[in-house]
Amino acid sequence: MAKKKSAKKKKNNKIRYVEAAPRKATVLDALKSVLPETASGQLLLGVLIGGAVTYVMSDEELREKIIRQGVQAFGNAAGALAELKEQIADIQAEVMAEQSEEA
């Protein structure tokens, strides 16, 4: 991203440029690079997304499948997290046992 420059006049009427710190990229900046820049392109994209959402929300079978997949994904993630916690507890117990043997 280009650095912004602002002009300041000194007492002797010479212009001095001061460089501003570069801005960090945000999620919105990344989103702007993906979205179309023209108003008609943005309108078309909005109509397409709105139509897709309306179709999904109005079709009961499809909505049920999406919700079922979401619940299954959440259950899988919760199970994986529980397994990870167990593995961490096992490793901690092994480390404690090794430390007590060394002492």
Image (spheres, rainbow, N blue to C red):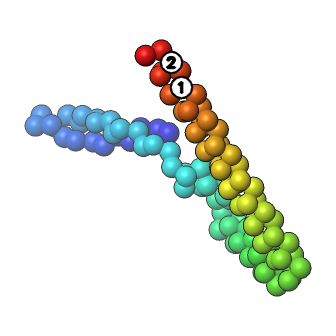
- Which residue occupies 12% across, 34% down? 12
Q: Relative to 99, is 87 above or below?
A: below
The residue beneath circle 1 is 97
Name the side, left or right, on which 56 lies relative to 30.
right
Name the side, left or right, on which 51 lies relative to 37.
right
Name the side, left or right, on which 6 lies relative to 41.
left
Q: Relative to 1, is 75 above or below?
A: below
Q: Is residue 20 or residue 27 the one in the foreground?
A: 27
Q: Are marks 1 and 2 in contact (CB under 8 Å)?
A: yes
Is any atom of residue 25 visible in this view? yes
- Which residue occupies 41% across, 39% down? 22
- Which residue occupies 68% across, 56% down? 78
Q: Amino acid at mark 2?
A: Glu
The residue beneath circle 2 is 101
The number of numbered discs placed on residues in the rendered structure image is 2
Q: Which image quadrant for residue 45?
A: bottom right
Q: Is residue 10 or residue 94 the one in the foreground?
A: 94
Is any atom of residue 40 visible in this view? no
Residue 45: which numbered mark, if any? none
